[in-house]
Image (tube, rainbow, N blue to C red):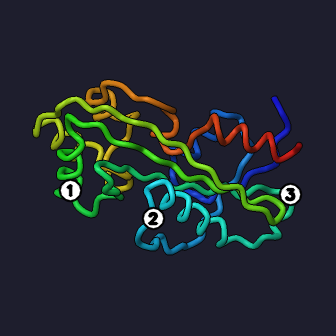
Amino acid sequence: MQKIPHVILASKSPRRQELLRLMDIDFRVVLKDVDESFPEGLTPPEVALHIARKKAEAFDETVGDEVVLTADTIVCIDGLILGKPETREHAIEMLQRLSGRVHQVITGVCLLYKGRYNNFYDLTEVFFRKLSDAEISNYVDKYQPLDKAGSYGIQELIGLIGIERIDGSYTNVVGLPTEKVYAQLIALNK
């Protein structure tokens, strides 16, 4: 395995933490409060990148030899960004909108290392089959996906029974494009 600097993961997402563990990357979690608003007129990839960069900028640029890794994942359909649902009803509404359609999952990533910012994103297209109202309600009640963009986790029930296929990175849909993150972390030492 290539040498990777120690990582500060600025995310409370258990999914991102698990992905880094599976990648055998040494990391610790440090959280900072960040305003996740963004200017109007940005494209969905620009929104994800903007928020990831804001999260990185919350850290002092002198974090030593550690890499600050921040990320923001958004779900987009018909140019509309679906954030995290605010209520059970909102989650159901989002899943009904995604049902039987194709949408994009975009994760913006920012690596802050030795005062330099490296920003990149990944985009995956997700194809949902038509979901019944009962399937949607059961999922929302059982998994309570209020902490997930677009109201679902690909690794949970609705992803297992509802996603026909994806075009792009699976881990991007989970919340972190591990292939790109790994390549960029390796490049830091070159």
Which percent across, then down, holds residue 10? 62, 59
Q: Would you name the residue on which mark 3 appears? A: 65
Classed neighbour count for the residue bearing mark 3: other residues with Cα under 10 Å, few (<14), some (14–19), many (≥20): few
Task: Give the Cα separation between the discs numbered 1 and 3.
Answer: 43 Å
Which percent across, then down, holds residue 82? 32, 56
Q: Is residue 23 above or below residue 32?
A: above
Q: Amino acid at mark 2?
A: Leu
Q: Which one is in front in this view, the residue at disc 2 or the one at disc 1?
A: 2
| Marks 2 & 1, CB-CB < 8 Å contact | no
Name the residue rendered at 45%, 37% in the picture: 124
The part of the image, by quadrant, that contains residue 183 is top right
For the residue labelled by badge 3, is the local secondary structure a helix, a strand or a loop? Answer: loop
Which percent across, then down, holds residue 43? 44, 59
Which percent across, then down, holds residue 134? 11, 37
Which of the marked residues, 1 or 3, is nearer the chain's N terminus? Answer: 3
Name the residue rendered at 55%, 73% in the picture: 33
Numbered mark located on residue 88 in the image = 1
Numbered mark located on residue 42 in the image = 2
Classed neighbour count for the residue bearing mark 1: other residues with Cα under 10 Å, few (<14), some (14–19), many (≥20): some
Name the residue rendered at 74%, 51% in the picture: 7
Relative to 179, is 186 on the left or the right?
right
| Marks 1 & 3, CB-CB < 8 Å contact | no
Q: Which one is in front in this view, the residue at disc 3 or the one at disc 2?
A: 2
The part of the image, by quadrant, that contains residue 101 is top left
Relative to 189, is 145 on the left or the right?
left
Quadrant where the C terminus is found in the figure = top right
